[in-house]
Structure formats: C-alpha cells, structure tokens
C-alpha cells in the first residue's frame, strides 16, 4: 500500500539530507477520505493523522479513538476562535495559529483546561491575500507575543503558493524558525515532501499520495 512507499521515500530523503532516520514525522492527511481508507492506514499501525476542519474531525475521530489507541491528531486547517475549545480537546497539535486574537483565545483556554496542544504558527510565505498565515515581516513579533502568552509554540507551518517553486518557501520558513530558535517545521505535502525534508521539515503533511485522490464531497 502507499503508506509503505511514502515511509520508504521519507527514509530515503532523510538519509540523502544527512538527517537522522525517523526525524521527520508523517502526518497522514485524512480529510474527506472515506473511513475505510483511514481504517486501512490505522490497521497498518500508523497513528498520526491530519484534518483541516474541526467539525469533520469531531465526527470522524472519536469512533476511531475508541477502536485504536495512541492516535495523534493534528489540525492543519484554519481555526475559528469559536471552535478553539473543541479543537483543543480533540487535537494533539494545531498547525494554524495565525493571528493575535486566536493566540489570546488559546492562551485563555489553556489556563482553563490545564492543557494545550503543541502549536505551530502558520506563516503566509507567499504573501497571498486569500491565504491564512502571519506575514513573514510580522512573524518575529507574533512568535514573541505567543511566547509571552506562555503558549507551547513548537514551530512554524507554511503552504507554498501552488504556482511557485516550493523550496524557496521552505527555505524562508526554515530561516524564520532558526532565527527564533524554533525546532519544528511543518512543511511539505504529497508533491514536494522530499524537498521539504531536504530543507529541514520535521513534520510533512501527506494526503493524496497515501490515500489516493480525495473524493470530492457531493454538492
Ligand atoms: C490537504 C492538505 C495537505 C495534504 O495535501 P496532499 O496534496 O493531498 O498531500 C497538506 N496540508 C494542508 C494544510 C492541507 O490542507
């Protein structure tokens, strides 16, 4: 199955980059995939998954969590503040922290709940108007603000513009992380995860290359 191919390609890319085997975490992006496909990947022992919508994840994952232990669930899509509590209870990591209002809400809820998922700050490396993420020029200040709020910021996340060479964006993200002393880099998808690993990705988010093309929801 494709999970094996992808883990083999990740190992090869780590070795080619002179990185430790196992230093890249594979997030299997299961959004919109039929449950049978997700269950097949769970059946092969994989436990780390990514979803881009809180609602969809809340419908899908409690059932899987009853059947399989050790599930590590990552939110990789935009988070509205009114869904923050639900997200913090459901996910082990949130990769889309992208604005002060959300950071403040997460900090308040972390106090109240006594726990907080691992957080990644999303950077809009392509400075695209329609895309979420803090602008690169504002990233250092926003990272500092999140740290002052005592948020557990593990790293940065980016989704490069579709038409551009992703490596330039991966390199920019790595540079911002390095100068801020952040160890985590969530970057690389089905089409470019090997390039991302070459540039230091610690988390790759791979969907269609594992599960097959996403079945478009009706309507
Ligand atoms: C859907 C999605 C992915 C996975 O995309 P594929 O091309 O199917 O690997 C990765 N990251 C984010 C943020 C996504 O929304």
Image (cartoon, rainbow, N blue to C red):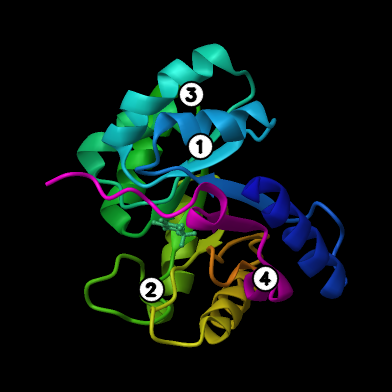
Q: Which residues are magenta?
A: 194-219
Q: What is the crowding at mark 1: few (fewer than 14 residues within 10 Å), some, or many (at least 20)?
A: many
Reading the image, the residue beneath label 4 is 194
Label 4 or label 1, whichever lies nearer to me, is 4
Label 2 or label 4, whichever lies nearer to me, is 4
Q: Secondary structure at mark 1?
A: loop
To which quarter of the image does residue 71 belong?
Answer: top right
Relative to 138, 191 lies left or right? right
Relative to 21, 84 lies left or right? left
Question: Of the residues under marks 3 and 2, which one precedes in the sequence?
Answer: 3
Label 4 or label 3, whichever lies nearer to me, is 4
- Residue 194, position as x, y percentages in the image: 67, 70
Ligand 1, image quadrant it occupies: bottom left
Relative to 15, 188 lies left or right? left
Reading the image, the residue beneath label 2 is 124
Q: Are marks 4 and 1 in contact (CB under 8 Å)?
A: no
Q: Secondary structure at mark 2?
A: loop
Reading the image, the residue beneath label 1 is 117
Reading the image, the residue beneath label 3 is 114
Question: Of the residues under marks 2 and 4, which one precedes in the sequence?
Answer: 2
Question: Of the residues under marks 2 and 1, which one precedes in the sequence?
Answer: 1
Q: Are marks 4 and 3 in contact (CB under 8 Å)?
A: no
Q: What is the crowding at mark 2: few (fewer than 14 residues within 10 Å), some, or many (at least 20)?
A: many
Q: Secondary structure at mark 3?
A: loop
State how far apart marks 4 and 1 are (Cα).
Answer: 27 Å
State how far apart marks 3 and 2 are (Cα).
Answer: 30 Å
């Amino acid at each position: 199955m494709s999970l094996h191919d992808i883990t083999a390609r990740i190992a090869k890319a780590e070795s080619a980059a002179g990185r430790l085997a196992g230093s890249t975490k594979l997030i299997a992006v299961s959004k919109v995939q039929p449950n049978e496909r997700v269950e097949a990947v769970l059946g092969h022992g994989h436990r780390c998954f990514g979803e881009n919508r809180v609602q969809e994840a809340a419908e899908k994952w409690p059932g899987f969590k009853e059947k399989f232990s050790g599930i590590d669930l990552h939110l990789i899509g935009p988070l509205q503040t009114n869904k923050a509590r639900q997200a913090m209870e459901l996910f082990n990591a949130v990769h889309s922290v992208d604005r002060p209002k959300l950071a403040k809400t997460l900090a308040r809820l972390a106090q109240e709940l006594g726990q907080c998922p691992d957080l990644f700050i999303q950077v809009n490396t392509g400075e695209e108007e329609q895309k979420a993420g803090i602008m690169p020029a504002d990233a250092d200040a926003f990272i500092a603000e999140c740290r002052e709020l005592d948020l557990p910021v593990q790293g940065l996340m980016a989704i490069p513009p579709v038409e551009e060479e992703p490596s330039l964006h991966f390199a920019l993200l790595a540079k911002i992380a390095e100068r801020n002393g952040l160890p985590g880099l969530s970057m690389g998808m089905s089409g470019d995860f090997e390039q991302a690993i070459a540039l230091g990705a610690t988390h790759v988010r791979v969907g269609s290359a594992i599960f097959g093309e996403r079945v478009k929801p009706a309507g």
